[in-house]
């Protein structure tokens, strides 16, 4: 039985009970250069259609991103990111009764997204690039996902144990959030699989989920179609990594992850049901 039972993740008006299921976050990239689906959903209309498909596939949360975070991506200025994500958020919020997350590391983008109806801020820099995001989360009572990011070597400890490095980094991120007034039940931690690390370290972080959970917060894992999966599957290209993604998602869920962030929602939702029964997050009769 999960020791998360009785707790919840609070995101704006949404309350997500923990320990009763693994939530699936569906990805909507409104970028021209994301590694998996860049350019497919640039228009608000196409993004809305994709969001509808993800919800139909039983996504619990939708994550809207206007700036690619793939290796070698081109930085996007604040206004361009706003111009990409805000029209999409405004179109989909009235349609779907699920939390909308904005994938951004800019406080101004985060604030406009929340004011447009989003309820979660997903910061891939864990407040280390723009700590004002914490103030936005506090003032708007939005959920706050804090990710470990090893792509800037100056920000990590380099202990030789990637899980320890993630714990140190994320502990600092949590301190920033709490000092800004963010409540503990607004916070989710993300080990940042694949960000600035080798393939072995990505797998180590998945195996280390229980250690991350010892920090006392729910954990989100985002393995979807990433390079470490391709490397494990004899160099499988991006469009052939969904089976591996489902496998990693199930294992992460079994090991205690509360949310998985993926592109192929349907297959992961089906796989997670089995994992949640085996880990006793839910009973067979509850599915």
Image: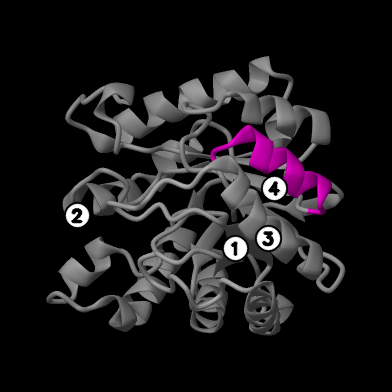
Q: Between label 4 and label 1, give the one nearer the viewer.
A: 4
Give the answer, above or below, for where 192 lies relative to 128.
Answer: below
Residue annotated with mark 3: 20
Tell me the distance, in whole angstroms, between the alpha carbons under discs 2 and 4: 29 Å
Mark 2 or mark 1: which comes first in sequence? 1
Mark 4 or mark 3: which comes first in sequence? 3
Q: What x and y, as percent, mark residue 142?
A: 76, 41
Q: What x and y, as percent, mark residue 116?
A: 81, 52
Give the answer, above or below, for where 193 lies relative to 214.
Answer: below
Tell me the distance, in whole angstroms, between the alpha carbons under discs 4 and 1: 17 Å
Would you say the residues marked 2 and 3 are in contact, meaning their CB atoms lie under 8 Å apart? no
Residues in magenta, as a range: 105-117
Q: Between label 3 and label 1, give the one nearer the viewer.
A: 1
**Residue beneath the point at 73% across and 62% down:** 87
Residue annotated with mark 1: 22
Q: How is the image coloured?
A: one colour
Mark 2 or mark 3: which comes first in sequence? 3
Of helix, strand and loop, which one carries label 1?
Answer: loop
Tell me the distance, in whole angstroms, between the alpha carbons under discs 4 and 3: 20 Å
Q: Nearer the viewer, residue 22 or 117?
A: 117
Q: Nearer the viewer, residue 212 or 104?
A: 104
User: Which quadrant of the figure contains the N terminus?
Assistant: bottom right
Q: Is residue 232 left or right of 102 when viewed as pictured?
A: left
Residue 199 image label? 2
* Residue density around tag 4, few if under 14, some if 14–19, many if 20 or more, within 10 Å: many
């Amino acid at each position: 039985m999960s020791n998360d039972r009785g707790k919840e993740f609070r995101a704006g008006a949404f309350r997500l009970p923990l320990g009763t299921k693994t939530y699936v976050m569906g990805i909507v990239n409104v970028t021209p250069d994301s590694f998996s689906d860049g350019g497919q959903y640039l228009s608000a209309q196409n993004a809305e259609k994709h969001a509808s498909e993800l919800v139909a596939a039983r996504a619990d949360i939708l994550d809207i991103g206007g700036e690619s975070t793939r290796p070698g991506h081109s930085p996007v200025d604040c206004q361009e990111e706003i111009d990409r994500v805000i029209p999409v958020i405004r179109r989909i919020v009235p349609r779907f009764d699920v939390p909308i997350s904005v994938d951004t590391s800019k406080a101004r983008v985060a604030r406009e997204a929340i004011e447009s109806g989003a309820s979660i801020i997903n910061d891939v820099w864990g407040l280390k690039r723009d700590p004002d995001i914490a103030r936005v989360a506090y003032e708007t009572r939005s959920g706050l996902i804090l990710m470990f990011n090893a792509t800037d070597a100056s920000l990590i400890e380099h202990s030789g144990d990637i899980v320890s490095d993630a714990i140190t980094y994320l502990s600092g991120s949590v301190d920033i959030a709490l000092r800004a007034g963010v409540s503990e039940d607004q916070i989710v931690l993300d080990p940042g699989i694949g960000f600035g690390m080798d393939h072995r370290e990505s797998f180590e972080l998945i195996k280390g989920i229980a250690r991350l959970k010892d920090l006392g917060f729910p954990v989100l894992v985002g393995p979807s179609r990433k390079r470490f999966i391709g490397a494990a599957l004899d160099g499988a290209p991006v469009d052939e990594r969904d089976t591996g993604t489902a496998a990693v998602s199930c294992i992460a869920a079994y090991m205690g992850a509360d949310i998985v962030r993926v592109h192929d929602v349907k297959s992961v939702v089906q796989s997670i049901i089995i994992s949640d029964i085996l880990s006793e997050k839910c009973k067979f009769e509850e599915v």
